[in-house]
């Protein structure tokens, strides 16, 4: 079973309107101990994100530092935000969002590539905010019971259609050990790779043997 965002998300979403003042933004982040808030429009649809990093730009770029010439685009954007006084002026837009049906793996990839620590979760039908998923929420995937992981690994083996002999699976502490014999070396490697993709697997120990090495290098002979 592929774990979805709905399996790990929080149902509470900390949001602010577009006209929220700078003081309101800071108070909200402090009160709820969050590193970012979602900015929503009148229909509660996310339009941007304001993070603590955005708010702190006022300290990094004081007013006296906002008129310099020949600056990079990033620095100009930072100064524009630093001059802002409302959520609409401070936010990063568009908001990067996920749905309840997004896989945990995809949510983790988004957070990594976009360098963010939380994502608004939207209702796929209405587009409105339904909750929030944080980095720490995604770690719940590694709290899966060993029996659930073992069941999913066996499903991977069954779906592979590998005619192995004496195949076995052991799971302890998220570490999966594969045992038995497959007809081909490539099939053993395929099973190990597939097992690694199962949610909650920390590591795969490949104790599989094989009857024939179909990946052996055979040097070319020239005459």
Image (spheres, rainbow, N blue to C red):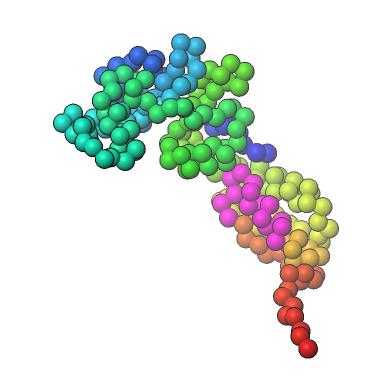
Outermost residue to the right: 163
Q: Give coordinates of residue 207: x percent, y percent.
A: 68, 64
Q: Report the residue at 55% width, 30% height from top.
A: 98
Q: Is residue 97 above or below residue 126?
A: below
Q: Report the residue at 70% width, 49% height from top.
A: 153
Q: Is residue 143 above or below residue 29?
A: below
Q: Give coordinates of residue 99: x percent, y percent.
A: 58, 27
Count of picture labels: 0
**133 displayed left or right of 170:** left
Pick the front one: 60 or 98: 60
Outermost residue to the left: 64
Pick the front one: 179 or 219: 219
Please state the extent of the stretch shown in magenta in the rendering. 189-203
Q: Is residue 199 in the magenta section?
A: yes
Pick the front one: 220 or 162: 220
Q: Is residue 211 in the magenta section?
A: no
Outermost residue to the bottom: 223
Q: Quadrant of the C terminus?
A: bottom right
Q: Can residue 100 be seen from the camera position used here?
A: yes
Q: Report the residue at 71% width, 56% height from top.
A: 191
Q: Quadrant of the N terminus?
A: top right
Q: Report the residue at 62% width, 60% height from top.
A: 205
**213 displayed left or right of 117:** right
Q: Please tell me in which quadrant of the rendered image residue 4 appears.
A: top right
């Amino acid at each position: 079973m592929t774990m979805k965002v709905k399996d790990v998300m929080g149902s509470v979403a900390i949001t602010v309107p577009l006209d929220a003042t700078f003081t309101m933004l800071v108070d909200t982040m402090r009160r709820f101990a969050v590193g970012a808030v979602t900015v929503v429009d009148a229909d509660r649809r996310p339009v941007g994100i304001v993070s603590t990093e955005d708010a702190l730009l006022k300290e990094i770029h004081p007013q006296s530092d906002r008129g310099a010439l020949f600056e990079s685009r990033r620095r100009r954007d930072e100064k524009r935000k630093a001059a802002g006084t409302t959520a609409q002026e401070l936010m990063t837009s568009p908001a990067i969002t996920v749905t309840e049906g997004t896989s945990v793996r995809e949510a983790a990839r988004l957070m990594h590539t976009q360098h963010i620590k939380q994502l608004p979760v939207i209702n796929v039908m209405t587009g409105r905010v339904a909750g929030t998923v944080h980095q720490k929420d995604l770690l719940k995937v590694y709290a899966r019971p060993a029996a659930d992981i073992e069941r999913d690994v066996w499903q991977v083996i069954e779906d592979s259609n590998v005619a192995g002999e004496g195949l076995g699976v052991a799971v302890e502490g998220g570490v999966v050990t594969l045992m038995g014999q497959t007809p081909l070396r490539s099939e053993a490697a395929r099973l190990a790779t597939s097992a690694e993709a199962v949610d909650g697997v920390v590591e795969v120990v490949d104790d599989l043997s094989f009857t024939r090495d179909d990946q052996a290098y055979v040097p070319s002979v020239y005459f």
